Each structure stands twice: as structure tokens, then as C-alpha cells.
Image (tube, helix red, strand yellow):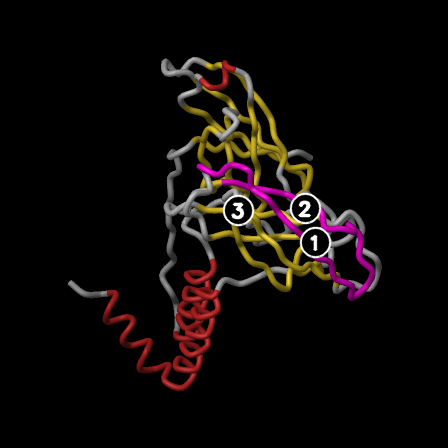
Amino acid sequence: MENRAPSIKNSQTHKNYFKEPNGKIIVEKIFIMGIIFASMTPLVFADVYIQNDQQYVGDDGSVHIVGEIVNNLDIPLNQINVEIDLFDENQQLIQTQKTNSLVNTIMPGMKGPFDLILTDNEAKNAKSYSLLLNYQASPPKSQVIDITESSLTRDNHNNLMITGTVVNNGEITANTISVIATLYDKQGNVAAVSKANPKPDYLGSEDSAFFVLSVPDKIQTEGIDEYTLIAESEEYAAVPEFPVGTVILLILTLSAYIGITRYSGRIITNLFSATNLK
């Protein structure tokens, strides 16, 4: 069964609902879970959505619409595509195009970028766009394809390149391995994306391979130094990674849990006092 999730830029609404706690143990659990969710969930209360999207014109004059798809469901997704409506300055529909996620299977809690490339003159007149996300549930995959190291450099012609090593930690051969890079600008939007296959594009169990990713748009990637990488194969998905900030927050969460366990009566009393200030 196909799912369709519309996304119109700058049109999200957020609502929060809270229930009054009933008893000391419940309050402790809510307090602990509140810290965990605050450290690990984004401020968009949706299960599958598009974020950090933008439109730009590449060095070759082609129009790009890029962004990333976030899967906050507890199941993997595949057959993922983005339907994009382009509008002129009078909000009249110019054309509708589709593009696929560069990541074939987006695992729970992970992201997949997309890049729609248009070369016709009609698309260059587009002043705005809307996005519609289509996806299906996927069978689970073991998350064992890992990128163990990477670096971003530029060659003598100022072309941006990302190099690194990908490894198969699974028990069987991984076929058709691909590495996908998402680059971000200073505002946190997706600046560019790129996809490449290491040579060879198959790896036996515990084998590794070197990869090179190039990004041709020099103007778009000028000053860019933040990026994420994800790798997958036909059989396996990428190893999930936690940002440094998330790790720190998880450590603070553990400290908070220890504090609550030892001093729960004092903390809960203070919580009620703080939430009932006049």
C-alpha cells in the first residue's frame, strides 16, 4: 500500500498534547522519557517528511531541487519518490516531475537525499514548488554496511571530492554497494548531493573498499565543509550513526536517570513546584 505525504515549503504546523501525571513513578518515567525524546527527535511531529530542501541553478545551467527524506517510522521504507510541482511567479503550475531517493531503503531514524535535475528552459522560470512524498513499507535489512573513514578535499581545479573506506560487516557478500553524500550549506539546507559506487562494488564478509565521490557544482559547494555519508547494498543497509551532540545528550540522560533514582522524592517535588508557578 502506497503512502503519500504532501510537503509544501514553510507550511508546517505543530501541536503538543500533554497528560497530567498521576503518581510518583509515572512522573519519573515521563521525566526520563522527556529528556530522551528531547535529545533524539526533531521539532517536526511527523513520521515521514522532507526537510532542508531548496532550489538552485548548477554550473551547467540546470535547475536542481534537493532535500532529504526523514523516516521516523519503526519500519524501513523503499520505492521512495518525490513528486514536485513547479509554479511560476503567478502561482500557475508549470510542470510536474518526479525523482527518487538516492538511498533505496531508508531505515527507521535515518535519512535519504534526493536531487531533481531539470534542463529545460521552462523549469528555469519556476519561482516556487511543492513536494509530495510517495513510499512503501520495506522488508527489514541488517544494518552492517559501515563507512569507517572519510575526508573532504578539493583538487587543483577546485572540484570538491569526498574519499573514504566502506566495509561489509555482514556474514555474506554485499552486492551493488553505493555511497551517498549529502552536503549542507551554512543555513543547514541541502546544498548538493552525490552518489558513487566503490571499485569493486561488491564486498565479501569483513572486506573493505576505497571510494571517491565528486561534486561538480563549484559555486554551489563553495565554502561547504559539512556533510553526511550513507552506504548500502542490495542485501544490507547502512550502520546507524549518532551525532556527537546526541551522544553527549544521551550521557546527560543517563546522569539524569541516576539522579532521579537516588533523589526521586526531592526532584519530583521540585518539578511540581516549578510547573505550578503563579
The image position of residue 150, as x and y in percent, is 59, 59
Find residue 92 and report its image quarter.
top left
The crowding category of the residue bearing disc 1, from other C-alpha atoms within 10 Å (few below 14, some 14 to 19, many at least 20), is many
Q: Earlier in the sequence, mark 3 or mark 2?
A: 2
Q: Secondary structure at mark 3?
A: loop
Q: Nearer the viewer, mark 1 or mark 3?
A: 3
The crowding category of the residue bearing disc 2, from other C-alpha atoms within 10 Å (few below 14, some 14 to 19, many at least 20), is many
In the picture of the structure, the residue carrying the numbered disc 2 is 105
The image position of residue 166, as x and y in percent, is 69, 59
Q: Secondary structure at mark 1?
A: strand
Identify residue type, mark 2: Thr
| Residue 156 counted in the magenta span | no
Query: What residue do we see at 37% from left, 81% from top?
Result: 264
Q: Earlier in the sequence, mark 1 or mark 3?
A: 3
Mark 3 and mark 2 residues within 8 Å of each other at the beta carbon? no
In the picture of the structure, the residue carrying the numbered disc 3 is 156
Mark 2 and mark 1 residues within 8 Å of each other at the beta carbon? yes
From what the image shows, is residue 95 above or below residue 219?
A: above
Quadrant including the C terminus: bottom left
Identify residue type, mark 1: Ala
Span highlighted in magenta in the image: 192-219
Q: CA distance from mark 2 to mark 1?
A: 7 Å
Q: Nearer the viewer, mark 3 or mark 2?
A: 3
